[in-house]
Image (cartoon, coloured by chain):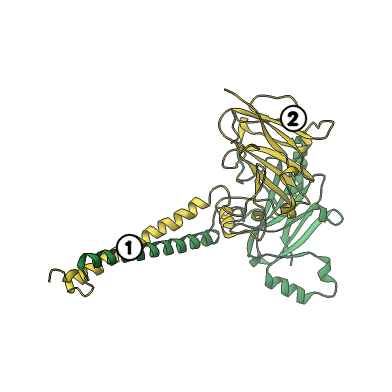
Chain colours: A green, B yellow
Amino acid sequence: MDAPGFRMRSRLARLTYALALLVTLAGIAHILSVLLVPRYAVFDAASRFLAAGADARAELITPDENGVSPILDADALTEVAVCGYDLADGPLRVSARAGAMPLAISLHIRGGGVFYAVTDRAAQRGVIEFVVLNRQQFEERAARDDDGDSQRELRVVSPALQGIVVARALVRQPSDRPGAQALVSAMACGGAG
Amino acid sequence: MALAPLTLQGRGPVRAAEGGLKTRSLALIILLALIAGIGSTAVMLGERPPLGAYRLGPWQTFPRIGSSEVDPYGRALLARGPHLPLAVGEGIRLNARTDDAGEPLTGACSYRIVGNTIPSRGWTLAVVDLSDRALTGPNAAALSDADLVTSESGELLITVSARVAAGNWLKAPRAGRFGLVLRFYDTPLAASLGQLSPGFLPRIERISCAN
């Protein structure tokens, strides 16, 4: 075999190998970074508002003095209040009273993602109420249940220990705004024992 | 003898040089791979999820972003900033950056939003910037279904323009491109978007443009 031909093939092989390695490693870095962003997130809504509602009352999210909402995809024609939760402290009981304007309650986990939502159409005697638990708490509670107990409360299993409860009311007319603020701020989120 | 260093069985010093080169090359490849991999993640996680878009005429929605079935890109996007997406069952959010003809929405033109809306407890229409953030201050512009004066036929008709218009009017910025966000709250169709056609949603028609 002549030396220049061998050298050429050797370089080509090394270049191909290097490119394949580069693409493979870049792909791995891409996938890992996409998967790790939620795990180490500090700017997601749940991380931002985890401390909200520490007094068992939802905290109203208000825009700053320039009218800019801290929520990137906020609708100016809604009012939103949040409670943070950490199920390491025990299950959480959420209750809100239905009002004159459309109301929805949703659960968002830390790192981003919604896993449950209910609207005021599901209210019983004008109240939306449910308990948020992790899988272990759910099973312990189910084991403690007497017959019929489980049917008296709606239980929602959170896929993460930490998250936020979001109450959102639609402000269809400017005169609805004070009522909508009162409605979402009245959401209670305390320990469920 | 002069060819000996080019062979794989090269002498000691040549082998050492090749080994050094390999280490430097490998380090460079790993560095480039990290830059490419993480850089491509940053590019893909822009203002909207790269996957899961559902298009209805000029309107685009990402139904899985509000569900536990959100894909890893959607979840990473939610993690990058305080987002509170509408949950499936809570409502639908639709974005438009173009009119029905596919031309970008711009403050130099006026538009007519006409047609149908899907059943819901209420809906809102807002002007947003190209990051899909609501405009604020004097540029803020949003209206709800309760704000509208409906025609005898019951058909929706809203003018979107920088200049004041008669009837239902939504203020557009005076210059530059903008977007529209249409949100339907508590709609029974949130879980069946696949059955909708563009005719279920309002059209965005260009009326005229300033010279």
How dense is the environment of label 1, judged by Cα within 10 Å: few (below 14), some, or many (20 and up)? few
* Residue B187, placed above or below residue A138: above
Residue behind mark 1: A15
- Looking at the rendered structure, the kind of residue marked 2 is Asn
Residue behind mark 2: B168
Q: Is residue B194 visible?
A: yes
Quadrant housing the C terminus of chain B: top right
**Residue farthest to the right, as pictured:** A125
Which label belongs to residue B139?
none
Q: Where is residue A64? Give x, y as percent.
A: 60, 40
Q: Is residue A139 left or right of residue A12?
A: right
Mark 1 on the same chain as mark 2: no
Q: Where is residue A62? Give x, y as percent.
A: 65, 43
Q: Where is residue A123? Give x, y as percent.
A: 83, 55
Question: Which image quadrant is residue A95 in?
Answer: bottom right
Q: Nearer the viewer, residue B81 or B56?
A: B56
Q: Is residue B89 visible?
A: no
The residues tagged by marks 1 and 2 sit, at their Cα atoms, a distance apart of 64 Å
Residue in the picture at 68% in, 33% down: B205
Task: Look at discs 1 and 2 and give the one toward the viewer.
Answer: 1
Q: Secondary structure at mark 1?
A: helix
Q: Nearer the viewer, residue A157 or B94?
A: B94
Residue in the picture at 75% in, 41% down: A171
Q: Secondary structure at mark 2?
A: loop
- Looking at the rendered structure, the kind of residue marked 1 is Leu
